[in-house]
């Protein structure tokens, strides 16, 4: 979609894909997940052919929805001819014309509530069908093998189809219980992090702002509907991170956190983060992480006592989350208070929890080994450089050799 006609469509592609998928899923049911995917892809391909010759329609989303819907109906007709048990007449009579309602959050809630699907599989499926990432992009963002991602998506589709068969799904009427809200929060958290630190090779920067914005927007809808303190703290975390986006890249270069121009930070988002920040009754990962980043942002220079506070916060966070990424950050902070040996022991323990040659694991380890084992540090640094496909990251590593926050 490089043609100028498609600049707007390119910017909104991910949101459009998710809206189309959610709308068709709500109208036709979970049994037709594969056909819905094909219909959406066909509608975008058709738009490429037609919109080059004619002007872009006034309501692009509605145009795409109608084309995708007609394509899906054709697929259902063909299946009916092959003796598939489907009431095509029902769909013919149920001509829904109001496509303006955004059902993405409701669809995420629906997927999140399915007990037959593993948490990681839910994230992968939602990344593709709600946020419009392709297999290669999901691979670049999650470090999962492309074949494993493809198989995971197909398994999820089969699980959904088997569970619901030809039964309809009232997406709009689905309500989330506390456990489902927790799962949705984790999904939006993952999506935002993927956008905030994108490893997609074709992107000039390292932030996929569209992906961050979509996760942020849906988290606000989730909070408005259910008013959970955990969601409010998730929004606080999103605000603090989003406030720094304008300063992460300067003149095409990635800028380390403590070297960023703080005048470029979005002060409104920064303050909004504190408005969303709510001390929970029980320890909450999003609250602690939001507090940590707010402390980073409040002081341009850290002294030993500041790092001690951050270490204590990471120790608290590990009581509620076993994430190896949290442990990586903890190890980096331990080195800042002179506990490098302890950090290296922990690194050796969490290595098996991460994919081979995990970028940030090797970065942290290379940094910790810089003084005690410079040869191994250089080897790891070279390995990172050789495996990095993004020019901006390679240049950053060459100029700084620092761990980014």
Image (cartoon, rainbow, N blue to C red):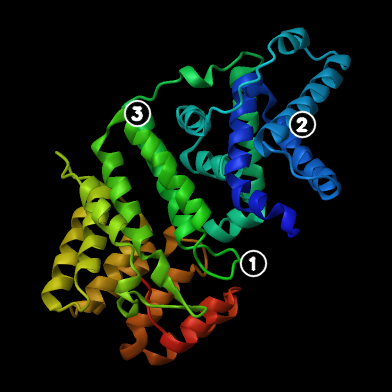
Q: Is residue 259 above or below residue 107?
A: below
| Residue position marked by numbered label 1 in the rendering | 202
Q: Distance between the residues labelled 1 and 2?
A: 29 Å
Q: Earlier in the sequence, mark 1 or mark 2?
A: 2
Q: Is mark 3 on a helix, strand or loop?
A: helix
| Mark 2: secondary structure | helix
Q: Where is residue 147 in the image (x, y as percent from the top left)?
A: 67, 52
Locate residue 59 relative to residue 237 in the image: left or right. Answer: right
Q: Name the residue under label 2.
A: 67
Q: Are marks 1 and 2 in contact (CB under 8 Å)?
A: no
Q: Residue at x 52, y 53 (%)?
A: 210
Q: How far apart are marks 2 and 3 (CA)?
A: 32 Å
Choose top left, top right, bottom left or bottom right for residue 271.
bottom left
Residue 160 sits in quarter: top right
- Between 269 and 81, the one lying in front of the other is 269
Closer to us: 138 or 67: 67
Q: Are marks 2 and 3 in contact (CB under 8 Å)?
A: no
Q: In this view, does 349 lie to the left or right of 228?
A: right
Q: Is residue 106 visible to us here?
A: yes
Which residue lies at the image location 61% right of the left edge and 22% below the top edge?
98
Q: Quadrant of residue 365?
A: bottom left
Direction right: furthest residue: 81
Q: Which residue lies under the disc numbered 3?
A: 225
**Rendered-image quadrant of the N terminus:** bottom right
Q: Can residue 134 be seen in this view?
A: no
The residue most toward the left is: 305
């Amino acid at each position: 979609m490089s043609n100028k006609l498609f600049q707007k469509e390119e910017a909104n592609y991910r949101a459009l894909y998710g809206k189309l998928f959610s709308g068709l899923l709500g109208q036709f049911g979970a049994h037709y997940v594969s056909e819905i995917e094909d219909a959406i892809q066909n509608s975008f391909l058709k738009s490429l052919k037609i919109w080059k010759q004619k002007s872009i329609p006034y309501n692009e989303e509605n145009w795409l929805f109608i084309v995708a819907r007609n394509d899906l109906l054709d697929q259902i007709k063909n299946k009916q001819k092959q003796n598939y048990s489907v009431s095509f007449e029902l769909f013919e009579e149920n001509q829904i014309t109001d496509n303006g309602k955004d059902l993405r959050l409701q669809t995420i809630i629906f997927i999140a509530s399915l007990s037959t699907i593993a948490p990681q599989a839910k994230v992968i499926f939602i990344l593709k069908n709600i946020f419009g990432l392709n297999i290669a992009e999901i691979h670049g963002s999650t470090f999962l093998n492309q074949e494993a991602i493809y198989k995971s998506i197909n398994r999820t589709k089969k699980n959904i189809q088997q569970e619901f068969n030809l039964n309809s799904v009232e997406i709009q009427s689905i309500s989330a219980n506390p456990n489902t809200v927790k799962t949705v929060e984790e999904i939006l958290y993952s999506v935002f992090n993927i956008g905030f630190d994108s490893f997609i090779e074709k992107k000039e920067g390292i932030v996929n702002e569209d992906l961050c914005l979509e996760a942020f927007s849906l988290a606000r809808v989730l909070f408005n509907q259910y008013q959970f303190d955990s969601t409010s703290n998730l929004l606080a975390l999103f605000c603090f991170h989003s406030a720094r986006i304008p300063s992460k890249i300067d003149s095409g270069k990635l800028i380390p956190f403590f070297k960023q121009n703080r005048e470029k930070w979005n002060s409104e988002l920064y303050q909004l983060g504190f408005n969303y920040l709510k001390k929970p009754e029980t320890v909450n990962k999003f609250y602690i992480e939001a507090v940590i980043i707010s402390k980073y942002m409040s002081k341009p220079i850290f002294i030993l006592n500041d790092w001690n506070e951050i270490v204590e916060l990471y120790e608290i966070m590990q009581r509620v989350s076993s994430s190896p990424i949290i442990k990586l950050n903890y190890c980096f902070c331990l080195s800042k208070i002179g506990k490098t040996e302890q950090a290296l022991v922990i690194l050796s323990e969490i290595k098996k929890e991460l994919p081979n040659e995990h970028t940030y694991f090797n970065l942290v380890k290379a940094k910790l080994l810089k003084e005690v084992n410079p040869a191994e540090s250089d080897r790891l640094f070279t390995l990172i450089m050789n495996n990095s496909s993004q020019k901006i990251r390679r240049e950053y590593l060459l100029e700084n050799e620092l761990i980014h926050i």
